[in-house]
Image: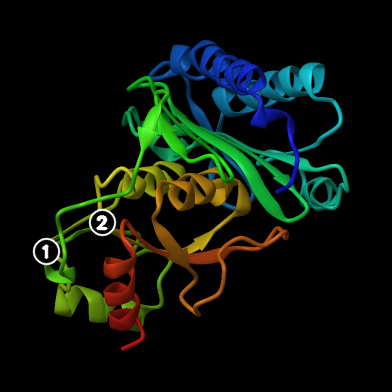
Amino acid sequence: MIKHPFQENSAWTLLKQGVRSLAKQEVLSRFEVVSAEEKLDGSLLTEADTQMQIQTEAFLQANWPQFAFLGEEQSQSEQETALKSPQGCWILDPVDGTSNFASGIPVYAVSLALMIEGQVVAGLVYDPDRDEMFAARIGQGAELNDKPLIAKTAKQQLKQTSGIIDFKRLTPELACRIIHDNPYSSQRSFGSVALDWCWIAAGRGHIYLHGAQNIWDYAAGYVILHEAGGVSSTLNGEDVLVTQVVKRSAVAATTPELFAQWSQYLRG
């Protein structure tokens, strides 16, 4: 087991309280009152993204300066340098679901993870609109608002499930096959990768598919889902988590049984 400060409850509580407070101050207070600008890659940026990243980095450096910092709004070279830090690296998405946030849709979150030696040892995803804090420490389970979070559902067959599917980033062939077959009972797409992972862990959806996620999108949700007992892989059957700034596909399910059925279907 990799040692880290958040094995201790006092540090863990401080981290969660700090992120919750900053999210309310820098993100929730700006909901429906800020405009967005377009970045070079076509994604959106708001004042909430910028200020949440600045203030969160300051909070983390003041309390745990030994760790490097990777934020979504940094340059790729800065992000890659942070990932190579031998002491470990924070990974922050200051507003996951910026398009929703900028459009007044209340489905967005702050995602923060700590990676050490290639493993995410702690992660939290905070939904300020619902005041829901999903969190997990490796080997210590997952939680939702300080209560144990266990991935479970009464759904036993793929055809009974609700799928959270992002069609935009799938190949046309796979997207068309899923649309034609409807292998699930119903389908949703919410626009926040971090919450997608957490909602699968909470059984709010049962199977998941996304074609291209960045590490700041999925790092915290990844450890939360796995510590809750859910399962994930890429479309190629590899571990989603890599210590690189590259986009990764994600296949996930609330239970191992549903994951096996979903993966088998996707393999054709």
Of 79 and 266, the residue lying toward us: 266
In the picture, the disc for residue 103 is: none
Of 119 and 105, the residue lying toward us: 119
Q: CA distance from mark 2 to mark 1?
A: 9 Å
Q: What residue is at 45 percent from the left and 39 percent from the top?
A: 142
Quarter where residue 71 is shown? top right
Proximity of marks 2 and 1: CB atoms separated by less than 8 Å: yes
Q: Which residue is mark 2?
A: 206
For badge 1, the amino acid type reads Gln
Of 31 and 119, the residue lying toward us: 119
Of 242 and 95, the residue lying toward us: 242
Q: Secondary structure at mark 2?
A: loop
In the picture, the disc for residue 160 is: 1
| Circle nearer the N terminus (2, 1) | 1
Q: Is residue 264 above or below residue 145?
A: below
Q: What residue is at 37 percent from the left and 47 percent from the top?
A: 196
